[in-house]
Image (cartoon, helix red, strand yellow):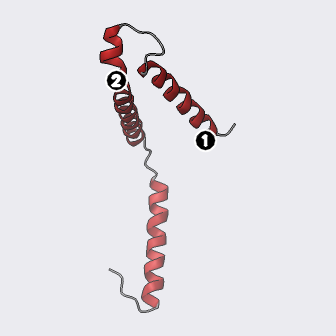
Amino acid sequence: MTRAQQTISIGLLLSSLYLACYLQLIPFSAKVQDEIIPVLPFWALVSFGAYLLFRLGLGVVTFNDVPEAHAELMKEIDIARKELKAKGIDVD
């Protein structure tokens, strides 16, 4: 099973479960049915957004600087400037 099929299967399972809860096919107390079930999709969306922001922040915090790659890139930029200058193109 590919990752896309797995994701679609999980999404369909969760949406079917939510729909069964929302249509009161699965019995819950009145308070849960009236106050919690209707806001579950919003809660899931906010939680997923918070998770993605956490992953982004963690990626930024743990990003490694690579001085060798910076030096190599600067050399390539200098070579490209020299080649462009030889062709008569002015590069600042």
Q: Position of residue 29 (x, y in %)?
A: 37, 7
Q: Secondary structure at mark 1?
A: helix
Q: Residue furthest right?
A: 1
Q: Residues within 10 Å of mark 1 (few under 14, many from 20)?
A: few
**Depth order, front residue of 79/57:** 57
The answer to which image quadrant residue 3 occupies is top right
**Depth order, front residue of 23/85:** 23
Q: Residue at x 47, y 65 (%)?
A: 73
Q: Position of residue 84 (x, y in %)?
A: 45, 85
Vertical comparison of 69 with 86: above or below: above
Q: Residue at x 44, y 54 (%)?
A: 67
Q: Secondary structure at mark 2?
A: helix
Q: Residues within 10 Å of mark 2 (few under 14, many from 20)?
A: some
Q: Residue furthest bottom?
A: 88
Q: Residue furthest top?
A: 29
Q: Position of residue 75 (x, y in %)?
A: 47, 69
Kindly report the distance in space between the C-alpha atoms of the residues bearing marks 1 and 2.
28 Å
Q: Residue at x 47, y 78 (%)?
A: 80
Vertical comparison of 3 with 92: above or below: above
Query: In the picture, which quadrant includes the C terminus?
Result: bottom left
Name the residue that disc number 1 marks: 4
Name the residue that disc number 2 marks: 38
Kind of residue at badge 1: Ala
Kind of residue at badge 2: Pro
User: Pointers 1 and 2 in contact (CB under 8 A)?
Assistant: no
Query: In the picture, which quadrant includes the N terminus?
Result: top right
**Depth order, front residue of 71/43:** 43
Label 1 vs 2, first from the N-terminus: 1
Instruction: Decide if residue 90 is on the left or right side of residue 1.
Output: left
Vertical comparison of 12 with 23: above or below: below
Q: Residue at x 43, y 67 (%)?
A: 74
Q: Position of residue 43 (x, y in %)?
A: 35, 27
